[in-house]
Image (tube, rainbow, N blue to C red):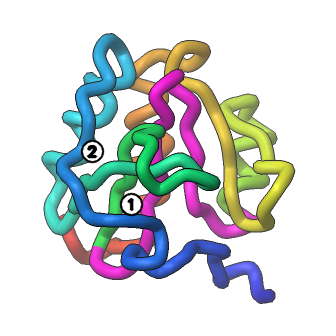
Amino acid sequence: MTDQARSTLPREAKGPFAPPPILGGPAQVVADAIAAWPEVKATTHWHLNDQTRVDGIDFYVGPDELGHIHLDGTIHLATTLELGAEMAAEGLGKPFPWARGWTMASVNRLGPDVAVSLFRRNYDRLRPAAH
């Protein structure tokens, strides 16, 4: 796997398409900001082992997963290894232990503004000409 490759599944493999749930609190502030960006599609993030159980919101830019926010405010970003390492070095996230090329963080720890900025860095990487 190269640094540019991401370990994301195609959207259709992640469960049925459904409108995103309401997260509430700071996580909802983050979700609303991301969903307003050009080309971003928000949909339900299903529990990994149960595609009938809602577990947050997925964000896609075209076919690429930007990342998702879980119901508890945990963020998983589909970054490159390089971007993930930058975020970790800055104390903003840490490598996701179960998949290469993913970075995890917490809206509750970082606050909405910093959480949005992490998603924005990944968005800018995926779509530098989109804005």
Kindly identify the residue that appears in the image at 26 percent across and 64 percent down.
17
Within 10 Å of disc 1 (Cα), the crowding (few <14, some 14-19, many 20+) is: many
Q: Which residue is mark 2?
A: 34
The location of residue 41, given as percent across then percent down, is 22, 61
- The one nearer the camera, 50 or 125, is 50
Q: Is residue 114 above or below residue 54?
A: above
The location of residue 109, given as percent across then percent down, is 60, 15
Distance between mark 2 and mark 1 Cα atoms = 9 Å
- Sequence-wise, which precedes: disc 2 or disc 1? 2
**On the rendered structure, is 98 left or right of 14?**
right
Q: What residue type is disc 2 on?
A: Ile
Residue contact at pointers 2 and 1, CB within 8 angstroms: yes
- In front: label 2 or label 1: 2
The location of residue 114, given as percent across then percent down, is 47, 27
Q: Which numbered dot is residue 123?
A: 1
Residue 125 appears in the picture as rendered: no
Kindly identify the residue that appears in the image at 27 percent across and 54 percent down.
43
Q: What residue type is disc 1 on?
A: Tyr
- The one nearer the camera, 98 or 83, is 98
Q: Is residue 86 above or below residue 118?
A: below
Within 10 Å of disc 2 (Cα), the crowding (few <14, some 14-19, many 20+) is: many
